[in-house]
Image (tube, rainbow, N blue to C red):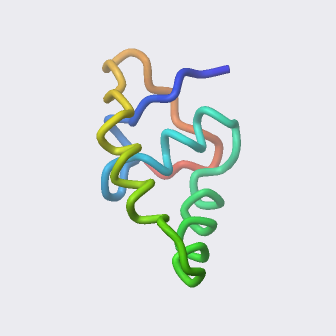
Amino acid sequence: MARLVRPREGAMIAGVCAGLAQRFGVPTGFVRLLFVLSLILPGTQVIVYIVLWILMPKAERDEWAPARGARR
């Protein structure tokens, strides 16, 4: 399984959704859709996203391999 890192390519805002998709082997669009849909519900989704943005290291240049469904 891949490490949990933010990609240098394929990121829309900070790369958190793309990094999670890479780590768990699901399409990036699916993770992004789940995040956007979760914003409808009350909760701390945005705070969790910001915390992951801070805690997830940025991938090294040779470390990033796009997740399935990731745009280039």
Q: Position of residue 64 (x, y in %)?
A: 44, 26
Q: Quadrant of the N terminus?
A: top right
| Residue shown at the point (32%, 35%) measured from the top left | 8
Residue 4 higher or lower than 21, as above or below: above
Residue 1 higher or lower than 67, as above or below: above
Residue farthest bottom in this picture? 40
| Residue shown at the point (52%, 36%) measured from the top left | 66
Q: In which quarter of the image is residue 46?
A: bottom left
| Residue shown at the point (49%, 51%) measured from the top left | 17
Of 41 and 10, the residue lying toward us: 41
Residue 25 higher or lower than 35, as above or below: above
> How many badges with numbers are in the image?
0
Does 41 sit left or right of 14 as displayed?
right
| Residue shown at the point (61%, 57%) measured from the top left | 31
Q: Position of residue 63 (x, y in %)?
A: 43, 18
Q: Position of residue 57 (x, y in %)?
A: 34, 27
Does 30 sit left or right of 18 as displayed?
right
Residue farthest front in this picture? 43
